[in-house]
Image: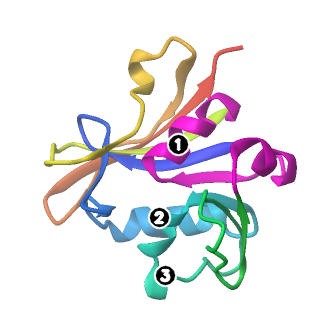
Amino acid sequence: MDLIAAVDRNWAIGKDGDQLCYIPADLKRFQALTTGHAVILGRKTLATFPGGRPLKNRRNLILSRSESFAPEGAEVFPDVDSLLAAAPADAFVIGGESVYKALLPHCDRAYITKIDKAWPADAFFPDLDADPAWQVTEEGEPLEHEGLTFRYVTYERVR
């Protein structure tokens, strides 16, 4: 499995149930990488999507302990083991914080958008730079959107 996330300087990913910022080029990259694949996410992340509906052109696998949660167009799993049994090997983990933490040990590649700014935040991604199990395998040139500098960094699990 792979994962994809946008993080700030402190590996923050969100505040008050939403992303820290929206960068059109990053959203296009997310769409290009994940379309046609299964995406794995939590119930709260799904709530941030337009209309709270699953993403189109993807198999949406939701990790939620809520037995009554059954959004149309998605499959819901009560625990990591049942989700892993159903998830294809080319699935993308797309958040949020607890889903990333639960599934990081099962991922081999991480597509990270690093944003050169620090925001107040309450949701974080594990710091892959500080984790010896991960190494940078590709780092893009700095890009800019409305004064924000960001770059795409690919990490792979050390074998």
In the depicted structure, whether residue 142 falls above or below residue 108: below
Q: Position of residue 82 (x, y in %)?
A: 80, 49
**Disc ID at residue 45:** 2
Give the total number of marks visible in the rendering.
3
Which color scheme does this rendered protein use?
rainbow
- Residue 89 seen in render: yes
Mark found first going from the N terminus, 2 or 3: 2
State which tag comes first along the sequence, 1 or 3.
3
Of 44 and 57, nearer the camera is 44
Question: Residue visible at 77% across and 41% down?
Answer: 81
Q: How much space separates mark 2 and mark 1, taking CA atoms? A: 11 Å
In this image, 93 relative to 136: left or right?
A: right
Amino acid under label 1? Tyr
User: According to the image, label 1 marks what residue?
Assistant: 100
Residue density around tag 3, few if under 14, some if 14–19, many if 20 or more, within 10 Å: few
Q: How far across and down, in percent of the image, does residue 26 sit?
A: 42, 62
- State left or right for residue 62 relative to residue 153: right
Find the magenta span and give its range: 78-107
Distance in Å between CA atoms under marks 2 and 3: 9 Å
Among the two numbered marks 2 and 1 on one chain, the one whose residue lies closer to the N terminus:
2
Residue under pointer 3: 52
